[in-house]
Amino acid sequence: MVMRNAIYFLIFALALPAWAIDKLTASVDKNPVLVGEYFTLTIEANGKVSGQMPDTSALSQRFVTGPISTSSRTQIINGSMSSATTWQMQVMSRRAGDFTIPSFEVAGEQSQPLNIKIVARDQDASEQKDVFIKVSLEPQSLYVQQAALYTMKLYIGKDLIEAQLSEPVMTDATLTAMGQQKEDYEIVEGRRYRVITRNYLIQPQKSGTFSIDPPVFNGQVREGYRRMAMSAIGETIDVEVKPIPNDYRGDWLPSELVNLAEEWQPSDNKVVVGSPITRTFTLTALGITKEQMPDIDVPSVSGFRIYPDETDRNQMARDGRVISQLVASYAILPQKPGVYTLPEVKLPWFNTVINRVQYATLPARTIEVVADPNQPQIPSQPEEVQTSTNNDQSLTAVEPQIVYKEAEKSVIDWAISTFGYILWVITMVIWLVKSRRQLPPAPTHSIKEQEADISALVKELSLAAKQGDAGAFYKSLRKYVETGQKLTVKAWLNKQDTEIRDEIAKLQASLYSANESDVDTLSLYKKIISAEKRVKSGTQNRLEQLY
């Protein structure tokens, strides 16, 4: 008997792939269903289906759907085999009404459509006192790309065992969760609730009238020794989104308040040539994300070099509003003496309160640049000609008379002169005798030591250049110039060509502005060494010609 059943089972198992289903049914576990309450949709085929699934994409147009789970079973009763394949998914509606679940098709068989009734929640129902949701949006009237803060609060009055909380939904808009959810406790109508708060950033991308579908809670709470299923849903919020005005020009910046401030370091309006100035801009806007904050364009000024520093962007939520801030710093290097006026900085933005374009403005600033007193000044040629001309005129105008008179010397004068001459002769004789007794020091050793020191400084400079560390490279360069060349940095720079001076100025600006990526230290090192070799080669050639 056992052998016969085994043979039957083997035959039926081999024949299973060839079987076709003859019936497909769809059912739900509850009807009617509350708004925001999940129900289970089950699709079952009375046969084994391989590699096929029902198409449920039409449900997502009206319902919130979860993932599909698939299961199959096979039974043998008195030698008769039956198989079934089941698909299940969680479905929820955010709105009340009568809906139709369409038919599904698998392996040529179709199910019958289902009618389901979604019932609105009674706000005075007893279960709403245990779990409920409150939502808010600030502001409710928006412009395209204006940021609004959507706040959801879930109130739980019983011990929560497990929970599932969906996110709000709005078409043609971006929703981003802001920060982590917060948990606290509140007293509502004399009852203590555990409150879970979540904030979302909503930015509509199109104009028109839209609705924000609220989040939905489904979970289980403990009441005594029982587990009770609970569900809750917030209210739907309608939003009016206005288009960008046609006459607006510039980066679109819709906000309730925009402030532009700056800080100078040093704050004096009188600076020295080559002394770096740090100009820091702080742009603060309400109802704008940090990604929307525009870059601040600093106009170039002849006689100044401007190097941008890193820009920092931040945003936060406070008092139901989104606040963003941009901090941008620039290093400014004056190149020539004179009086300069830095032009004003003007940034347009759209005031959503009064519906009008306004400007965040920083006034123009006048700066006096003076020459470095430690830097030697070379007068220009016209001044020399004018000075020599003035001297010639003064000499021509006043012609002093020179009177030559022969001085008369006494006997004492002659004696002092003779005695001094004798002392000088004696000193020279003593110096010659001592110099012959002492061996002259060998200068080769000191020269070799000096060359070794310079070689070590060059190696240190080369290592810093290869590492790309601008700070270490500039430190090694100063050591090489001051110790190896016995010069100050300014005196050494005066001997270099324009290209090297510009690169050193760029290096100094990079160190001040903390932007080291702008300087190629290895290329600068090669230029310096090449220039030093040319100078040394030229000096040797001149010495050979002298000999």
Image (cartoon, grey):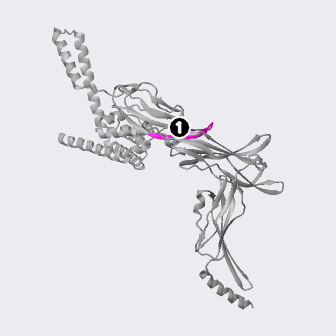
- Res 228 → quadrant: bottom right
Percent across and percent down for residue 491 are: 33, 33
Percent across and percent down for residue 219 are: 72, 55
Residue 114 drawn above or below residue 233:
below
The magenta span reads 309-323
List the residue tagged with mark 1.
Answer: 325
Residue at the location (67% across, 61% down)?
Answer: 115
Q: Answer left or right for 501 relative to 200.
A: left
Q: Answer left or right for 270 relative to 154.
A: left
Percent across and percent down for residue 339 are: 35, 24
Residue at the location (79% across, 48% down)?
Answer: 126
Percent across and percent down for residue 182 are: 67, 45
What secondary structure characterizes most of the magenta part?
strand
Quadrant containing the C terminus is: top left
Instruction: Look at the image and tell me whether residue 226 can be seen.
Output: yes
- Res 479 → quadrant: top left
Instruction: Look at the image and tell me whether residue 66 can be seen.
Output: no
Residue at the location (60% across, 75% down)?
Answer: 50
Task: State the residue in front, 514 or 261.
Answer: 261
Q: Answer left or right for 124 relative to 371.
A: right
The secondary structure type at the circle numbered 1 is strand
